[in-house]
Amino acid sequence: MILARFLGPRVIVLVAVLLAAAVLVPAATLALPASSPFHIPAYLVPLIGKYVCYALLALALDLVWGYVGILSLGHGAFFALGGYAMGMYLMRQIGSRGVYGNPILPDFMVFLNWKELPWYWTGFGEFWFAAIMVVLVPGLLAFVFGFFAFRSRVTGVYLSIITQAMTYALLLAFFRNDMGFGGNNGLTDFKDILGFPIQAETTRAGLFAASCVALALGVLVVGAITRSKLGKLMVAVRDAESRTRFIGWRPEYVKLFAFTVSAVMAGIAGALYVPQVGIINPGEFAPVNSIEIVIWAAVGGRGTLLGPVIGALLVNYGKSVFTGLAPEYWLFVLGGLFVLVTLFLPRGIVGTIDHGWSALRERRRAARAEKGESMGEGGVSSQAAE
C-alpha cells in the first residue's frame, strides 16, 4: 500500500502487466497446443521480446529527456555497447563449433589471421564478467562524456549534436576490422547462452521473460527516482536551470546522475536484445537509430513513464507491418508520424490523454463550485423573502 502510494497506481499496474506477460506469454507458447486460440507461435516470442527491449530503451531516454530536458541523440550508442558486451560473451561460447574449429578465436579473427585473442576480450568467456561489462561500459562512457559536457554547460541543440557525433564516431570505429569486433559483419552465429541452446523455444521464452522483468524493474527504478525529491529537482533543472543554480543546487550533477543511470538501462536493453535477434553489428550505432528512440518517446508522451513504453511498442509494431507491405516508404511514414505528433499531439498519446482528463476534472470542479454558490445565493434570497 505504501509502495503504491509512493510510486502511483499507473506504475504498479504497468509492472503487474509486465510480470504477468513474463509468465503468460511463455506459457501460451510452451504449454498450450497449436490448436488453441490462445497459443502464441514460437517465432513471435523473440519479436515481441525485441519490442520489450526497445520499450526499456525508450524509458531510458525518457529519464533524461522527459524529466531533465536532455535531448540525447546518442542513446543508440549505449544500447549497442551493451549489445556488443553480450555478443562477445556469446561468441566465446561457440568454442570449437565455429566454421574454422578454433576453440579460442572467433571465426572472423581466424579469417583475418589474428594469432591471439585481444586483451579486451579476456574474461568474456564468463557470464558474470559480461554482465558487469554490460552495465560498466555504457555507464562509464556516459559518466565521462557527461562530466565534461555538463561541467562545460553544454545544453540544448549543441548537446544533442555532440551526442550524435559521439554515436557516429563509434559507428566508424566499430566498422574497422582491426578493432576486433567483427567489422561491418559484427557478431553473429551464436549457439548457447548459459549452457542453453539459443534457438530453443524454452530459451527464447526465458529471454522474453527476462526482458519483461528488466522492463518492470526499469519502470520501478525510474518511477522511484522521478517521484522522489531528486525527481522534483530534476524537473526543476529541466524547467528553470538558471534558477535552480541560483538557489544553490548543482544542475550538472543532477544531469550526470540521470544520464549515467539512463545509459546503464540502455546497455541492459541492448544486452537482452542481442540473443533474441541473433546479431549485433555497427549498424546499431547509426544516428538514425537514436533518432527513432526519440520518436518512440515523443509519440507515447515524454515525461509520463507509460508513454515511452506505449510509443516504442506501437511504432515498432507499425514498422513491422509497414516494412512488410511497403518497405521503401517506411522512413517517410516514420518522418510523417513525427511531424504529425509534433504538430497535433505535442504531449504524445499518454500526455494528451492526461491533459484531457485534467481539463475535464477542472471543468467538473468548477461546475460543482458554481452550482454550490448558486444554491447558497438561492438560500439567502429565500430567507430574505421570509
Image (spheres, rainbow, N blue to C red):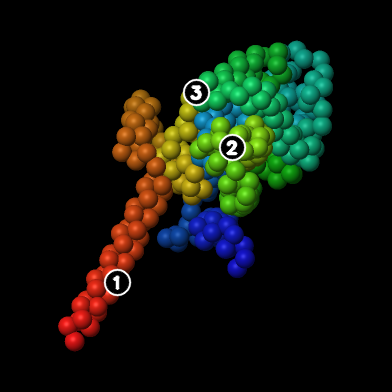
Q: Which residue is mark 2?
A: 244
Query: Which circle, 3 or 2, is nearer the viewer?
Result: 2
Report x, y in % for residue 89. Answer: 73, 34
Going by the image, does 3 lie left or right of 291? right
Can residue 333 be seen? no
Q: Quadrant of the C terminus?
A: bottom left
Going by the image, does 303 lie left or right of 248? left
Q: Nearer the viewer, residue 59 or 184?
A: 59
Secondary structure, mark 2, is: helix
Distance in Å between CA atoms under marks 3 and 2: 21 Å
* Residue under the image location 41 percent in, 47 percent down: 351
Q: Is residue 248 above or below residue 357?
A: above
Number of other residues with Cα within 10 Å of mark 3, as a class: few under 14, some 14 to 19, many 20 or more: few
Label drawn at residue 157: 3
Q: Amino acid at mark 2?
A: Thr
* Residue under the image location 68 percent in, 23 percent down: 148
Q: Amino acid at mark 3?
A: Val
Label drawn at residue 372: 1
Q: Quadrant of residue 90?
A: top right
Label drawn at residue 150: none
